Amino acid sequence: MKACLVLTIVLTAVRGAVLEKDAVGVDIQLYPTNGQLDVNPDVQLKLTFLSPPTIGSTGKINVYDSEDKNLVDTLDLSVPFSPSPYGNGSTKANYTDTTKYQTNIIGGLDFYFYPIIVRNNTATIYLHNNKLTYGRKYLVEIQPGVLEPARGSFSGFTLDQPWRFSTKSHGPKAGATSVVVAADGSGDFNTVQGAIDWAPGNPTKRTTIYIKNGNYEELVFWQYKSNITIRGQNREKTIVGYPNNSAFNPPNRQGPSRRPAFSFRGVADLQLSSFTINNYYPGQAEALLVDGVRIILDHMTLNGAGDALTTYGTLYVTDSKLTGTGDTVLGYGSAYWLRSRIESIGAVTWTRTVQGIHGNIFVDSTIVGLQGNSTLARLPDNSGGVMDNWPYAEMVIINTKTDGIAPEGWGPVQGPPFDSSHVRFWEYNTTDLRGQPIEISQRLNVSRQLTVPKDKEVIAEYKNPTNILGGWHPVVLEGYG
């Protein structure tokens, strides 16, 4: 089997870069360059050919410690990537499947992953996380069959003629509260995950991870780390993403979801600012899954598919944009949205609020149905009528502009025996994109229009994020912090 992922990502070779040669003299650009010093241990190995390569189905990539020749890491290309290597198979776990798949431990959780991804002429090799360490020299062996250029042949590297590099003598200084991620290796880390793995679990001072402009194609996941800011250099030019979904990474028997491109659980006091998160696969494929308390998304762009953003805990979203393909917000938590925009094919949210908390609250925001017939929230029969579904589901929109929303606005909502009397699908001063009032005569009867002066106090309550987020008053940190 050969696999070559084709995505609309442009990664070009650096002009004027030094060309190396493989074991039989084929020109190739390597990163790190052969013999390079002071390489970050989380480096991704890159080979840029004169023509696009394809990924083979045989051969191994081996990394050895130069001093003792011990094998540090190995990638076997005969091992399949996933039960659904193109993300288009079953989304259900097959617990009788005993096949060995390519697996990487990320943030303590096992994920199926691509050991190589090809973009244009560049093949990026993803070693298993945390295999390389500081202050060591490494030899890379790439066996024939691992990569096959469109023109010519690639015989790889041997232990007699290896690809060599050395890592930095040490990482960030003890007590450091900020680090830089740079894809070109000029920072403290090459990858976002490398910086997160370094970050202390519960620091007394806030930790800031600054991501330089670049395209970071990696799965990101961590658990039980708090008091962190992750800030991009430029919202449009700092891009973190991965092709992942519930077919490529089906559910485990226990543990968190593995289908998001970027996710975390059990965290507190986290701020994500000024970068883009993409999930490049269709289906159930979150760009971001949030599981924590006092989480801030500030000037973020999230592009996913179904369930593009899943929320647990408490979340404050400001000046951000989310795009998805239905149930675009799968909301279990309390989320306050300010001056933000959602674009959705199909239902904008499936709000699964439990009793005693608030759900999705939108203030001064914009909601767009991309195909002209979206609804704001739905509550379908999710249980065959044998349970209560989500009887306290809540979504409230205040002073929000809309476009492409069906005349009924809300739904579908499960009928009897489901009791919808506690559902809060409310809106106040909903307008079109020009600020003109919309027609509400066909609104679903489960929903409610708030009015003044009758609902003045209710509207004021919902406009205050502290009321929505369990008493937390969110403060967005500006600049480098």
Image (cartoon, rainbow, N blue to C red):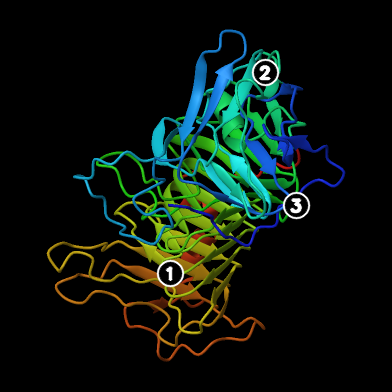
Residue type, numbered disc 2: Gly
Which type of secondary structure does the marked residue at label 3 adopt? loop
User: Circle 1 sits in a helix, a strand or a loop, which is it?
Assistant: loop
Specify few, some or many for label 1: CA neighbours under 10 Å numbering under 14, 14-19, or 20 or more: many
x and y, in percent, of residue 174 in the image: 66, 13
Instruction: Check the image and report above or below for 165 versus 193.
Output: above
Name the residue at 77% across, 31% down.
186
**For marks 2 and 3 on the same chain, the one whose residue lies earlier in the sequence:** 3
**The residue positioned farthest toward the right in the image shown:** 16
Q: Is residue 454 visible?
A: no
Q: Quadrant of residue 104?
A: top left
Give the image location of residue 373, x and y in percent. 46, 84
Relative to 458, 39 lies left or right: right
Where residue 257 sits in the image (x, y, percent)?
37, 46
Q: Earlier in the sequence, mark 1 or mark 3?
A: 3
The residue where tag 2 is placed is: 171
The amino acid beneath tag 3 is: Thr
**420 lies left or right of 109:** left
Look at 50% across and 90% down and name the residue there.
439
User: How far, Cα to Cα, is label 1 from label 3?
Assistant: 33 Å
**What is the spatial separation of the Cα atoms under label 2 and label 3, in whole angstroms?**
29 Å
Q: Which residue is mark 3?
A: 12
Q: CA distance from mark 1 to mark 2?
A: 43 Å
